Amino acid sequence: MARRLLILALIGCLMALFINFAPAAGQSIKIGFPIPLTGEIPMVGESTKYAAEMFKDEVNAAGGLLVGGRRFPLEFIYEDNESKPESAVNATLKLIDRDNVIVIVGPQSSRQAVPAGGVADDNEVPMITPWSTNPEVTRDRPWVFRAAFLDSFQAPVAANFAAKKFSAKIAAVMFEISNDYSKGLADNFKKSWESLNGADSIIAMESHGPKDQDFSAQLTKIIAMKPDFIFLPENYNFVALIVRQGRELGYKGPFMGSDTWGSAELMKLCGKDCIGQFFSTHYAAARATGATKAFIDKYKVKYGYVPDDVAALTWDAVLIITQAIQNGGKVDKNVRTMRKLIRDNLVSMKNFDGITGSMHFDAQGDPVKCAVVVEIDQSSQFSFVESVCPR
């Protein structure tokens, strides 16, 4: 009799465990991604989706995200923002109103993230942008967060490194006038550079439009002024064109880049012209260790190439979101309740260890974290040079 009672008790315990950790019937965790699947920077959209899908597949293979003793499948909805600000607004609205997502991951580029962040904040939907570095994305928007450092930090990183590496005193800058990221970082760099070398140390601030393909006029002017280097806070598609045209016009000096160079597509477009150049970014895949190396290895096996910083930051952004959901302890059927719960837990998340580094969040929802400078080496890899951390 005692043996029978013991068996029944064990069966009861097993049933309780199954109930507690079984997938929740009919309820998923819906997360929206307004990303550039087409347009000027489709590789950014691809990297985002690939990293997100790899994350989702791992969680769902385990039965779903464990929240409050129950498992909930992740459901990711991707909406193309076409690399356009107005499309980013429409994509974000669709995800909020049509799909009833509980949180937004993206957009990636500041040009789309600034207007999309306004939409998310107005509708009280938590949004985390993985890659955007323009301060306006999160400024005075309590529902908007990010996983990347700010341009106000990146600019002095680039300026100090260029001054040291190139023994530079005078610099020229090229940027896209209609891109919040490009123009904002150019302005921040100008301030940082002039604080190091004086008011006349920026000899040219040359701009171009979003559809320009010929930069010979701007480059001819810059080259004639003989700068020690050219700073290019540009998307990777423009970098390839500008660097190549600069070389064709006879410029032999260095270029210094920013984190938008860090796409897996850069070297396909730029080739040997970009070898030996430097840029500031969020992580370096070469010689990575620990969780970062594990992520890189899994991504390479699944997709056939090394993940860029967009992919790594997307992974971190999704991990931040899922941790915020888990910290809430429940998945409420009321979408508005769930959105507020996530937002509150993002605000209270003081520290986070991600594959792009350790960070803590300030009052604006911006992470305080280190940047790295990488060199494009002879094998076309982004090779770690140095790490620069906030003081």
Image (tube, rainbow, N blue to C red):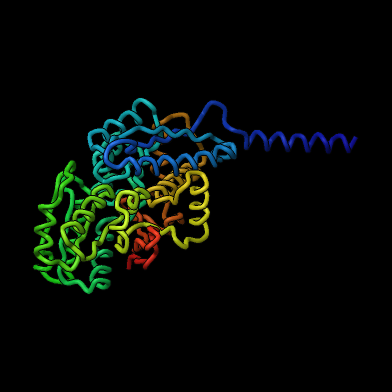
Instruction: Please tell me which residue is depicted at 15% across the width and 58% down the height of the picture.
Output: 249
Q: Is residue 118 left or right of residue 349?
A: left
Q: Is residue 147 left or right of residue 182?
A: right
Tell me if residue 55 comes above or below residue 245 in the rendering. above
Number of numbered discs overlaid on the protein picture? 0
Q: Which image quadrant is residue 8 in?
A: top right
Instruction: Please tell me which residue is depicted at 68% across the width and 38% down the height of the picture.
Output: 17
| Residue 246 position in % (x across, y down) | 19, 57
Tell me if residue 136 comes above or below residue 165 in the rendering. above
| Residue 121 position in % (x across, y down) | 29, 39
| Residue 245 position in % (x across, y down) | 19, 54
Q: Is residue 189 left or right of residue 120?
A: left
Residue 140 visible within the image: no
- Nearest the viewer among 325 and 260 is 260
| Residue 290 position in % (x across, y down) | 52, 59
Q: Is residue 210 left or right of residue 317?
A: left
Residue 242 visible within the image: yes
Tell me if residue 299 comes above or below residue 275 in the rendering. above
Q: Residue furthest right?
A: 1
- Nearest the viewer among 15 and 170 is 170
Instruction: Please tell me which residue is depicted at 47% across the width and 63% down the height of the picture.
Output: 287
Image quarter hosting the C terminus: bottom left
Image quarter hosting the N terminus: top right
Instruction: Please tell me which residue is depicted at 53% across the width and 34% down the height of the picture.
Output: 73
- Nearest the viewer among 74 and 285 is 285
- Nearest the viewer among 42 and 133 is 42
